[in-house]
Amino acid sequence: MNSTLRRWRVGAMQGGFALALATSGLTAWAQQPTAGCDSRQDPAACRREAGAAREEARRGGLTAPAEGGAQANALARCQMQPAGDRADCEARVRGSAGAGMTTTEGSVMGGGIIRETVTPIPAQPQR
């Protein structure tokens, strides 16, 4: 009788431990989708997007961006600039502004990345 009670207690403890592990796993999963959400973003929209991304990942539809894809896109946008500005645009994208100094600030979440290039031009001698 005593050994039966002991076995029951051990079984109950093991079951409780398994339940605790399962619950903590579910809790972690439930918190994971909103972990990447910005506090300024609507939580319901974030959960919808996270759920859609999980579903797409399950189907194998999510892929990593192609290497250099962002730079190729930016260089393609430089082609829309007037011919005189095109070379400067491409230099900013590549981060090699020649004699100029390029600074980059901002973020996509903040509304965009701003690149500014300052190129000193020597003054023309006065006649």
Image: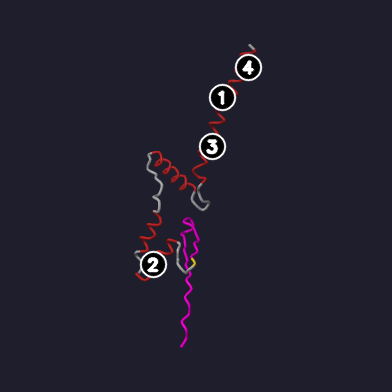
Q: Nearer the viewer, mark 4 or mark 2?
A: 2
Q: Which residues are magenta?
A: 102-127
What amino acid does circle 3 point to? Thr
What is the distance, in whole Å, between disc 4 and disc 1 at their CAs? 14 Å
Which secondary structure, mark 1? helix
- How many C-alpha atoms fall within 10 Å of the one at disc 1: few (<14), some, or many (≥20)? few
Q: Nearer the viewer, residue 75 or 96?
A: 96
Residue at (44% x, 46% y) in the render: 49
Quick check: 81 above or below 65? below
Residue at (34% x, 69% y) in the render: 83
Residue at (50% x, 38% y) in the render: 29
Counting residues from the N terminus, which is met first, the one under dot 2 or under dot 3? 3
| Residue at the spot of label 3 | 27
Which secondary structure, mark 3? helix
- Could you tell me residue 80's position as x and y percent? 34, 65
Which secondary structure, mark 2? helix
Which secondary structure, mark 4? helix
What amino acid does circle 2 point to? Ala
- Could you tell me residue 55's position as x and y percent? 41, 40
Instruction: Determine the residue located farthest toward the bottom in the rendered image.
Output: 127
| Residue at the spot of label 1 | 15
| Picture quadrant where residue 23 is located | top right
